[in-house]
Image (cartoon, helix red, strand yellow):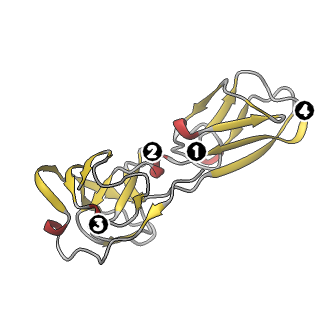
Amino acid sequence: MPKKIDNTAQAAPAILADILEGDGHRVPTVGVEQSQTLVLGQVVGYLPSVERVVALNTTEQSVTRNGDNSTTAFDLGHADVDVSSVKAEVAGAFDLDFTISRGTGGGGVDQIVFATAPPTGASNTIVKYKQISSVPYGVMAKAITTAASEFPTAPVVVSGGLVRSKLTNVPADNPVGSFMGQCFLV
């Protein structure tokens, strides 16, 4: 089930100090993926394959493939699959005996590799997963808009206390008093 995003922040914070609580924040400058509009206080995910932050994406993806009793590796639709989120169903039963192979599919997408080839059948192999960008990485310390083929950097708060009510795109399962990565929500 996809995580719900809570966008109940009252208004975008005017300055970085509005979202910080206490001391000891770590705010590195990080690459930003192309074609993004990110606002101050927005929770972002991270794509390790390109080493850039992106808008948090909690959408569960699904791919359906045909088994042929010999193929064990199937392309997923994305790179940077969150391995802990992968669920595979083969011929109507959950299959837990698989690995994820990073960037080995067509166009550099990740692949699921089953220990035993799925049996022959049309649409009998269903894989559901989320991208790593569904896991909160940090919070934008500055607003930025990037164009296609533009990869600038921007500061991102990755640890320390943050005022939850001033943030946007906070996963609903991160209430006040919880940790979101290395950030503590107050």
Residue shown at 38%/71% (left/top)?
A: 8
Question: Quick one: 114 or 108, which is closer to the camera?
Answer: 114
First along the sequence among labels 4 and 3: 4
**At which x and y percent is residue 121?**
90, 37
> Image quadrant of residue 14?
bottom left
Numbered disc in front, either 3 or 1: 3
Q: Which amino acid does label 3 sit on?
A: Ser
Q: Is residue 19 left or right of residue 77?
A: left
Q: What residue type is labelled 2?
A: Ser
Identify the mark at residue 49; answer none if there is no mark: 2
First along the sequence among labels 1 and 4: 1
Residue bearing mark 3: 165
- What's the CA distance linking mark 1 and mark 4? 26 Å
How busy is the neighbourhood of tag 4: few (under 14 within 10 Å), some, or many (20 plus)?
some
Residue bearing mark 1: 108
First along the sequence among labels 2 and 3: 2
Q: Kindly indicate whether the residue at mark 1 contacts the one at mark 2 (C-beta within 8 angstroms).
A: yes
